[in-house]
Amino acid sequence: MPKWFELSACDEAFLETAPFVRRFSVPLPVSAETAWAELTRDNTLSWCTFIAGSRFLTPRPFGAGTRRELSMRPSAVKATEEYFRWEEVPGLRYRNTFYVSGFTVPGIRRFAEDTLVEPRASGSRLTWTFAIEPGPALRVPLRLGAPAVTAGLRRVVAETETHLGRIASG
């Protein structure tokens, strides 16, 4: 059984003020409803190279307080996520935001993620924001490794865009 490290809670402001923030916005060839259904389904993100799978720890319907566990590749790295925002406004926007409450790798103080899906005249738009505050031991490595971390996050977004593109053409 892996050892878990507790991370500090954070709120929406952290998505703007964290030492490391990356925001990606991509058009999607599917409706906002289809994109949202894929991003909130059981085992979501399993199409990504770095994600082995995910499972919700709380029952549907989801909302603030929902919890999920994410498993990463290639090792047994896991994260427990706690959602503090969950909005589903059909025709306008779908959005959820969580912070990581537990991680099986030491050194990160806070981590948050915001997912926003908005309808467009053709398809939808996904805006994904990632925010990280490293602990003292990871400050310099994160600063030096920022291009690699950014590339990894960009890959998750691109693989999600590709996955949703396959749904649109299938």
Image: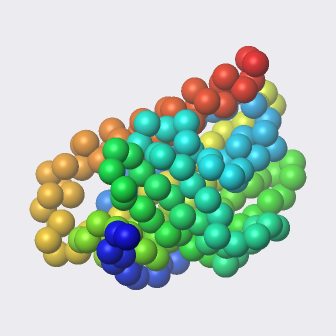
User: Residue 118 at what x, y percent from top left?
Assistant: 73, 46
For the C terminus, the quadrant is top right
**Horizontal side of residue 148 vs 46, given as left or right:** left
* Percent coordinates x, y for residue 69 in the rendering: 54, 64
Foreground: 1 or 108?
A: 1
What colouring style does the render use? rainbow
Write down the quadrant of residue 4 in the picture. bottom left
The residue positioned 78% from the left and 39% from the top of the image is 34
Judging depth in this view, the residue of 102 and 164 nearest the camera is 102
Q: Is residue 156 left or right of residue 63?
A: left
Q: Is residue 67 left or right of residue 106?
A: right
- Between 19 and 106, the one lying in front of the other is 106
Residue 151 locus on image (x, y percent): 33, 39
Q: Which residue is nearer to you in this view: 19 or 88? A: 88
Mark yes or no: residue 102 visible. Answer: yes
Task: Give the total number of marks visible in the rendering.
Answer: 0
Asked if 79 appears above or below 120 in the picture, the reply is: below
Residue name at image x 36 percent, y 58 percent = 77
Task: Report which quarter residue 67 is drawn in.
Answer: bottom right
Looking at the image, the residue that sits furthest to the top is 169
Q: Residue at x 69, y 58 (%)?
A: 95
The quadrant of the image that shows the N terminus is bottom left
The answer to whether residue 83 of the structure is visible from this angle is no
Across and down, in percent, residue 32 comes to: 77, 42
Residue at screen point 87% across, 52% down: 90
Of all residues, the one furthest to the right in this rendering is: 90
